[in-house]
Every structure is written in C-alpha cells, then in structure tokens.
Image (cartoon, rainbow, N blue to C red):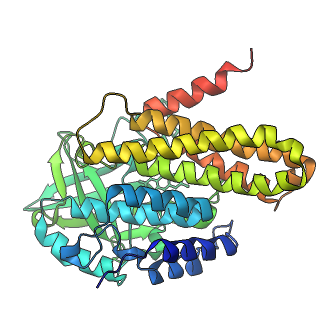
Amino acid sequence: MTCIPDESEFSALTARLRELANPDAVDGWPTEHLRILWQAGAARWVIPREFGGDGIEAGTLLWRYRELARASLLTAFIFSQRNAACQRIESSANRHIAKRLLPDLASGHIQATVGISHLTTSRQHWQVPTVTATLDGTDYLLNGVVPWATGAGSADLMVTGGTLSDGRQLLAAVPVKSPAVVVRPAIAMLGLSASCTGEVELHDVRVPASDVLHGPVERVMAAGGGGAGSLSTSAIAIGTAQGTLDRFAEEAKRRPELNQYLKPLQQEADVLAQSLAAAALAMAGPSQEDRVSPETLRQRANSLVIRAAQAWLAATRGAGYVSGHPAERAVRDSLFFLVWSCPQAVLDASLKELSCGLW
Ligand SMILES: Cc1cc2nc3c(=O)[nH]c(=O)nc-3n(C[C@H](O)[C@H](O)[C@H](O)COP(=O)(O)OP(=O)(O)OC[C@H]3O[C@@H](n4cnc5c(N)ncnc54)[C@H](O)[C@@H]3O)c2cc1C
C-alpha cells in the first residue's frame, strides 16, 4: 500500500488550504488546517518506513514545504516545527526512543514540537545558558526557560535541550503534559500569532541517560543537519513569496501596468525554486562546487519574500494598508523571515541589504 499522496491529491490538499482563512491571533490555533493535513497523511511523510511512515525524499519534502507555504504559511510553518522534532528523534543513535515515539508520531496519535533555538540562534549572548542540564545519579535534570516553542500547548512532547556546566549540550524529547513543564501563554506577535508560540518553563525535568537523543556533546545542534537556516526554512520563504505573487498577479490581471513589476519578481521566485531543487539534489549526491549554499539561498529567499510583499502593498496603495487587507498581512508575515531561524550570516546579509539604500 502506498500512503504518499500523488500529485493531484497533493494539489487538492493545497487547494483546500488556500480556501481556508488563516487566523491571525493567539486564540486562532489552526485546528482545521492541521486536521486536513493529517487527513492527507502528512504525519507520515518524514517518518521512515520501518516506523510506519512514508520516508519521503528530502527533495520531495522541500517541494511540498514550498507548495504548502504558498497556500498557507501558518500551516507550513507549524508543520515544519513538528517535523523538526521528528527528524531529531529519527537521527538519534538512541534507537529505543525512536522505536517508542516514531510509530505514534507517524499515526498522528501524538503531536510534537521543538524548543531548540536557545542552542542555535536565541540568547547566544547570555553569560549563563537559558536551560541548564545537571547530572543526578544517572539522570539529567533540565531547568530553565525555553524561549521559543511553537504550539507547545497542543503538543505531547517537545524536543529541547540543555547545557551542562562544562559546556556540553544534550537533546531530549520532553513530555509537555507533565507537572515539571509549564507552557506560558502564547505571545502576540507582528505576524504568525496563531502559531501559538511562546516560552516553556522546565522545572527539574528528569531525563534518564538512556532517554537522551543527542549528546552530551559540544554544539549538539551542529550534528544531524536541519538546523538554523536549513533548506526547509528557504523552501517556506520561497513558497510564501510565491503565494504573495499569486495574489499580486490577481491584481495585475485587472491592472496590466503592474506586470512590469510583477514579472521580474515571478522570475526571481522561479529561479530560487530551481536553486532549491538543485540544492536538494546536491544534498543527496556528491557536492557540486557551483551550487548555491543553504545560507545564500536563505538570504535570497528572505530578500524576495519581503520585497514581493512590499511591492504588492505598494501596488494596492492605501486600501492595502488597511488592517485585514491580505497585502498588509503579507507584509507582516514576510518580516517573520528576518527573525526566524536565521544564522548570523543570514542576519548580517539582511542588515547589509537594509542598510544600503538606493544610492
Ligand atoms: C513566530 C516565531 C516562531 C518560532 N518558533 C520556534 C520554535 O518552534 N522553536 C524554536 O526553537 N525556535 C522558534 N523561534 C525562534 C527563532 O528561530 C529565533 O531563534 C528567534 O527569533 C531569535 O530571536 P531572539 O529574540 O530569541 O534572539 P536574541 O539573539 O536572544 O535577541 C534577543 C534580544 O537580545 C538583544 N541582543 C541580541 N544580541 C545581543 C548581543 N550580542 N549583546 C547584547 N544584546 C543582544 C537584542 O536586543 C535582542 O532584541 C520562533 C521565532 C518566531 C518569531
């Protein structure tokens, strides 16, 4: 039995997502969007076949992230955080945890998220780690505040990590519905508030050494790929830009003089989508010197998604600036990519582009 939706089933999924309104506030967790995603079998995509999943190829996953984001950034983003948790479990050498958790994740019986940014991009300038790990017999105790976790209130487990006093770090899948874990209220943000993202407190969360997923090791997130600024984040940025340009194109049908601005942006999006596909191929095969690096791709995707939204807003004029117009929403949502999962090089490139001006 094949569980992978064919192209027409996948198109039907994205068409349904496009029809649904995307909530915009902290009380708007997109239950219906996620329900139709699971109904289409998406819970299985990143899970290997041996654990009841589909084990789809990296290139297919990136293509789907791009198309999902084109239909609904909110859905694609939440899904990517869940998948990041599954991938950290799957890439662990600890096979007993993989056997315990992955089948239930593949069937959709349990939900997961990640709270790992404090090990990569968040609070890196702090003198003390935001989450500490201490040894207690053969167990580790995690204490502190995970600064960012999307949908933790709806998750059964969160892949997160802490830092030992010697600087080594470890990752574990922590049960969220435990008295030792407190999910703080979701934060209202410039965009994506309905992703229900916020802080999570850890109070003596006990992780038996036999349950550790990765580490203890220095820079635990450097192992296993898929970290900050990964190709998945670019796929979502490019797809979001394409979704914006699809709607900009509707405006240009009525006002053909806009095509001179729309067309170059569409061409840029096409080129980036091709670069993404080539980067995915290169990941699977021998590395090619001339391929675009993940960081360069993310820089270009960030630039495009922000300019596409602002071009559409400028074209829609004052009407587009009114709260509730899809162009103002697109501008707010596009700015998410300036701050989400940006390694320093991507951040520097954004600041450089923004500081240059027209002269
Ligand atoms: C909508 C949304 C959803 C997210 N979901 C998740 C998720 O599910 N899981 C996850 O792991 N992460 C998630 N993230 C986190 C994200 O990937 C980044 O890690 C995060 O946006 C980095 O921002 P920060 O404020 O934590 O960065 P920080 O670098 O901690 O900056 C915080 C503040 O510190 C100050 N500062 C920064 N650097 C310095 C310095 N060198 N010296 C002095 N002061 C300094 C600045 O004033 C800055 O405003 C999410 C982020 C967003 C916006």
Q: Quadrant of the N terminus?
A: bottom left
Is 63 left or right of 96, judged from the image as shown? right
The residue nearer to you, when weighing 87 against 177, is 87
Residue 91 spot, x, y in % from top left: 21, 58
* Residue for point 55% across, 71% down: 11
* Residue for point 43% across, 61% down: 81
Residue 182 spot, x, y in % from top left: 42, 69
Is 71 left or right of 149, judged from the image as shown? right
Above or below 50: residue 91: above
Residue 9 spot, x, y in % from top left: 50, 77
Q: Quadrant of the C terminus?
A: top right
* Residue for point 23% across, 39% down: 286
Exactly how many numbered labels are in the figure? 0
The residue nearer to you, when weighing 50 against 161, is 50
- Most distant residue in the top direction: 359
Q: Is residue 203 visible?
A: no
* Residue for point 63% across, 49% down: 241
Is 301 left or right of 156, judged from the image as shown? right
Residue 19 spot, x, y in % from top left: 69, 74
- Most distant residue in the left direction: 138
The residue nearer to you, when weighing 77 against 154, is 77
